[in-house]
Image (tube, helix red, strand yellow):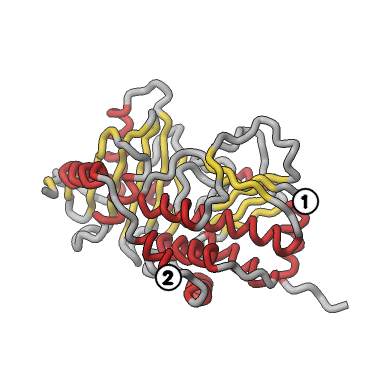
Amino acid sequence: MPAKTPEQNILNRLKNAAGTGPVLILTHDNPDPDALAAGKALATLLNDAWGIPSRLLYSGLVLRAENRALLDLLTPQWQPGEIPADLTPYSSVAMVDTQPGAGNNRLPAGVAPQIVIDHHHPMRELLEDVAFAEVHPEIGATVTMVDQYMEAAGVKPDSDLATAMFYGLKTDTRGLSRGTSDADITVYLRLLGQIDHSKLIQIEQAGLPQEYFQAFYQGLQAAQIYDHSIVANLGTMHRPDLPAEMADLLIRLDKARAVLCLGLHNEILYLSIRTKPLGRDAGLLVQKVIVDPGKAGGHGTMAGGQVSLAGREAAPLVAEIIRRFLRVMGETEEGENLC
């Protein structure tokens, strides 16, 4: 009997960890396109390769216009809701684009998933208790990993799933310009020939409400420029993903090497860090900036974290995070207003 290939070994491990189903598939709070697409791709793989059913469940909000359009148009199988207290109806729990202990998901403490597929570092200690744990920070998007499993299993995504996966990969790597591996390029080009271009356009050009522009205006006014860094304290926000979107914009300032954006939503302080390619590793930088009991993670040029206020005042936490960021970046002068 010929020896099994590494791909076959991975698929066998995944199938065994999944069990007979249904599999409860979870991701991080306020999921982004990579998370939404990777979760649906995993559900498709389990069903088409082995007949294993799944349930897709997300927590938090999906408010960014493009993300909402992707959810509604391409991945409507995701259901909003809290993780059930009783998990016995499920043969396994799978986490995509996040890990147990990362702090950005609502997996209860003491509950170990059977499957974890992620591309963020750091790798959490709780992975030791996971039957199928594949975490590869060198890869730019979780959809790349799941697509490789699908390719090995002979499962081809339909046009909706291919479009969702393509957009997830495109956004997480900023069009292959950040944190990109050879595997990401291969998957990107493979998916490009399978996408529904009309739906991709609908997602990328999704309509924006007036409050979006008001929030951006306020964010630009809040931005402080230092020698090679930008800090924007957005204050109380109408949506939790605003720091990430603001950071994506501000890092494009020609003199910026790193950007920190942070703001408060529903008693949680959210922060996002962006760095220039070939510069500082954002995932390592955010670990030096986050304050207890917050959790953070990332890779390459993008990272994020969150801190639950738990009755504490936000201002001292914000001041400490900004102080740490400026110290690590070597900023010694006062900042000046961007606008």
Mark nearer the N terminus (1 vs 2): 1
Image quadrant of residue 206?
Answer: bottom left
Q: Nearer the viewer, residue 70 or 130?
A: 70
Q: From the viewer's perspective, is 333 left or right of 46?
A: left
Query: x, y (%) of residue 160?
Result: 52, 63
In this rendering, the count of numbered labels is 2
Residue with the most extreme top position: 311
Q: From the viewer's perspective, is 223 left or right of 196?
A: left
Q: Quarter holding the N terminus?
A: bottom right
Query: Secondary structure under badge 1?
Result: loop
| Residue at x 40%, y 47% (from the top left corner) | 304
Work out whether 140 lies above or below 151: above
Q: Residues within 10 Å of mark 2 (few under 14, many from 20)?
A: few
Q: Nearer the viewer, residue 100 or 152?
A: 152
Look at mark 1 in the image and give the residue it sits on. 19
Q: From the viewer's perspective, is 44 left or right of 287?
A: right
| Residue at x 56%, y 34% (from the top left corner) | 82
Q: From the viewer's perspective, is 144 left or right of 266?
A: right
Q: Nearer the viewer, residue 135 or 263?
A: 263
Amino acid bearing label 2: His
Residue 317's disc is: none
Question: Can residue 74 be seen from the camera position used here?
Answer: yes
Query: x, y (%) of residue 266?
Result: 38, 30
Look at mark 2 in the image and give the residue it sits on. 197
Query: Secondary structure under badge 2?
Result: helix
Query: x, y (%) of residue 213?
Result: 22, 47
